[in-house]
Image (spheres, grey):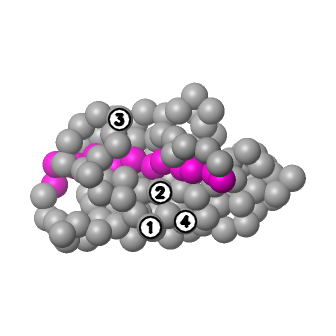
Amino acid sequence: QVHLVESGGGLVQAGGSLRLSCAAFGTNFRFNSMAWYRQSPGNEREFVAVISNDGTAHYADFVRGRFTISRGNVKNTAFLQMDSLKPEDTADYYCNFGFADGLGPFDYWGQGTQVTVSS
């Protein structure tokens, strides 16, 4: 059974940076994609970024140019570097993992990590 462990959330001032990490455990299957979604109170969960099996990255328009998704040295790890953070980026961020390509969402979810951006 695959499970995801996230870390890196916290409180930061507007204009600051945070780096989220996600590691997938319970599988050695190397073909996979990893994505990040976010959800703020009263809103639906929304796509943020994805990195496909071949390393191709896609971003939501509202983070493009500010956020960067990348793989770790171990393929079942991924990072989300978040720069120039805005108060509207405040949300719970969820790692999403699956054995497929595309934008997601995929089969497996992390528990979420909270990001708060103060003005």
61 w.r.t. 110: above or below: above
**Farthest top residue?**
61
**Residue type at tag 2:** Tyr
> Callout 4: helix, strand or loop?
strand
Query: Which residue is at the front of the view, 98 or 75?
Result: 98
Tags 1 and 4 touching, CB below 8 Å = yes
Spatial CA span between label 1 and label 3 = 20 Å
Q: Name the residue under label 1.
A: 111
Q: Position of residue 116 (x, y in %)?
A: 71, 60
Calculate the distance from the C-alpha at mark 4 to the C-alpha at mark 2: 7 Å
The amino acid beneath tag 3 is: Leu
Q: Is mark 1 on a helix, strand or loop?
A: loop
Task: From the top left corner, tell me how far across and down residue 115 is, in percent.
Answer: 65, 60
- Taking the spot 48% from the left edge, 40% from the top edge, the residue there is 47
Find out whether residue 13 is within the magenta segment: no
Mark 1 nearby-residue class (10 Å; few <14, some 14–19, many ≥20):
some
- N-terminal-most mark, 3 or 4: 3
Give, as a three-letter code, the residue at label 4. Thr
Q: Quadrant of residue 92?
A: bottom right
Numbered range of the magenta stretch? 30-41
Label 3 belongs to which residue?
A: 103
Q: Check disc 2 and report the residue beneath it.
A: 94
Q: Mark 4 points at which residue?
A: 113
Q: CA–CA distance between discs 3 and 4? A: 20 Å
**How crowded is the residue under tag 4: few (<14 C-alpha within 10 Å), some, or many (20+)?**
some
Residue 55 seen by the camera = no
From mark 1 to mark 4, how far is it between C-alphas?
A: 7 Å
Q: How far apart are marks 2 and 3 (CA)?
A: 14 Å
Identify which amino acid the numbered label 1 is placed on. Gln
Q: Do the residues labelled 2 and 1 touch (CB within 8 Å)?
A: yes
Q: Which tag, 4 or 2, sits closer to the chain's start? A: 2
From the image, state whether disc 1 or disc 3 is nearer to you.
1
